[in-house]
Image (tube, rainbow, N blue to C red):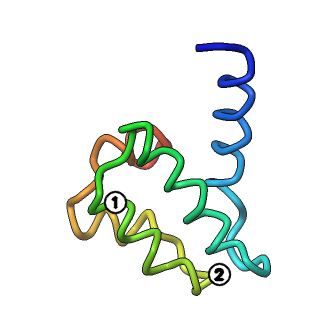
Amino acid sequence: MTERDETEAAEQWMLVRTPLGQPWSGRTRYAAAMYFYKLGEMNAETLEVYRICSRLDAEDPLPIIRNRGVGETWLKRVGNG
């Protein structure tokens, strides 16, 4: 991974963890989730939860992912597994 790739990944990691409730935070998290999906680090079912939550700035996608049982690897990565 190049330095530029590492910088981009770090930025996307911060964005996917944008605090709940901030204006446009759901869309920000979804856009960052798409980045990780394209890298193969997130499955489609997990990305779908981020899509559903994208217009709900105060909705935490992680409990939904856990309840659906679709993103065990992702939950471990974010420390909620």
Name the residue at 38% across, 71% down: 49
Q: Nearer the viewer, residue 63 or 34?
A: 34
Q: Nearer the viewer, residue 38 or 17?
A: 38
Report the residue that reaches farthest toward the top: 2
Residue 32 in percent (x, y) is at 59, 54
Q: Secondary structure at mark 1?
A: helix
Q: Nearer the viewer, residue 14 or 33?
A: 33
What is the distance, in whole Å, between disc 2 and disc 1 at their CAs? 17 Å
What is the number of callouts on the image?
Answer: 2
Looking at marks 2 and 1 on the same chain, the residue that comes earlier in the sequence is marked by 1
Report the residue that reaches farthest toward the right: 23
Q: Residue 59: name its quadrant.
A: bottom right
Residue 38 in percent (x, y) is at 43, 45
Q: Secondary structure at mark 2?
A: loop
Residue annotated with mark 2? 57
Residue 10 in percent (x, y) is at 70, 34
| Rendered view: 17 above or below 5 | below
Left/right placement of residue 29 relative to residue 11 reads: left
The amino acid type found where label 2 is placed reads: Asp
Mark 2 touching mark 1, by CB under 8 A?
Answer: no
| Rendered view: 30 above or below 32 | below
Name the residue at 44% across, 37% down: 39
Left/right placement of residue 40 relative to residue 27 reads: left
Residue annotated with mark 1? 46
Label 1 Cα neighbours within 10 Å, binned few <14 / some 14-19 / many ≥20: many
